[in-house]
Image (cartoon, rainbow, N blue to C red):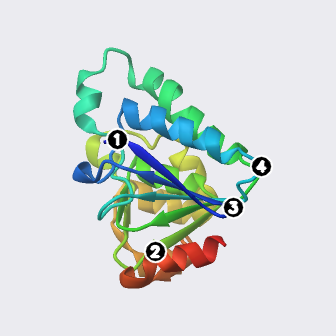
Amino acid sequence: MPEVLTERDGAVLTITLNRPEVFNAFNAPLHAALRAALEEAADPAVRAVVVTGAGRGFCAGQDLKEFQEMPESIRERLEQTYHPNIRAIRGLEKPVIAAVNGPCAGAGLSLACACDLRIASDAATFVPGFIGIGLIPDSGGSWFVHRLLGFARAFEWMTSNRRLTAAEAHAWGLVSEVVEADAFAAGVVEYAA
């Protein structure tokens, strides 16, 4: 099963993280497949990009089993995998929309925050996650969250590890719109078009 799926609908490219059995947690193959999908997104015929997750979740962050087994340091892994993909998203000269369909945590939150816009299903939840596993926010997380929420709110949220509902994330300005779960896929397509 491919780790990332891509689908074009007119000028909209949808990139779907495809590890639903682990809430689309990042691993090395998923990062490589995401990199290839973002290269496809650079095509001038693509006018908007949607990033979403397969199944019930957007992205649970890093697959911690893989981190326990990796030979290099966390810093090296970030520089090889996360950072190039985050830079690729930020470098696209077209809108990139995170369609957050369910739980969004840790590096998955960083990925969503790197996108230009975030639309959430009313079933979505958001949690920084890093402090809960003894890490500082990575993948641009602290930089993006600070700019989206302001210093005080970002600091409080990142250090408390509080889980936000989609409605709370909307009230805070983290997401632009909340759509009912049953109408989410159609709502995202309409928004992106």
Query: Dot 4 lies on which element?
Result: loop
The amino acid type, in three-letter code, at marker 1 is Gln
Residue, disc 1: 62
Q: Are marks 1 and 4 in contact (CB under 8 Å)?
A: no
Mark 1 against mark 3, which lies toward the viewer? 3
Q: Quadrant of the C terminus?
A: bottom right
Q: Are marks 2 and 1 in contact (CB under 8 Å)?
A: no
Q: Is residue 91 above or below residue 73?
A: below
Residue, disc 3: 11
As drawn, the label of residue 185 is 2
Mark 3 against mark 2, which lies toward the viewer? 3
Q: Is residue 64 above or below residue 56?
A: above
What whole-number distance in Å separates the C-alpha atoms at marks 3 and 2?
A: 17 Å
Q: Quadrant of the N terminus?
A: top left
Residue 176 visible in the picture: no
Q: Is residue 130 above or below residue 147?
A: above
The x and y percentages for residue 131 are 33, 47
Earlier along the polypeptide chain: callout 1 or callout 3? 3
The residue at the point 65 percent across, 47 percent down is 41
Query: Dot 2 lies on which element?
Result: helix
What whole-number distance in Å separates the C-alpha atoms at marks 2 and 4?
A: 24 Å
**Number of numbered markers:** 4
Q: Are marks 4 and 3 in contact (CB under 8 Å)?
A: no
The residue at the point 47 percent across, 37 percent down is 33
What whole-number distance in Å separates the C-alpha atoms at marks 1 and 3?
A: 30 Å
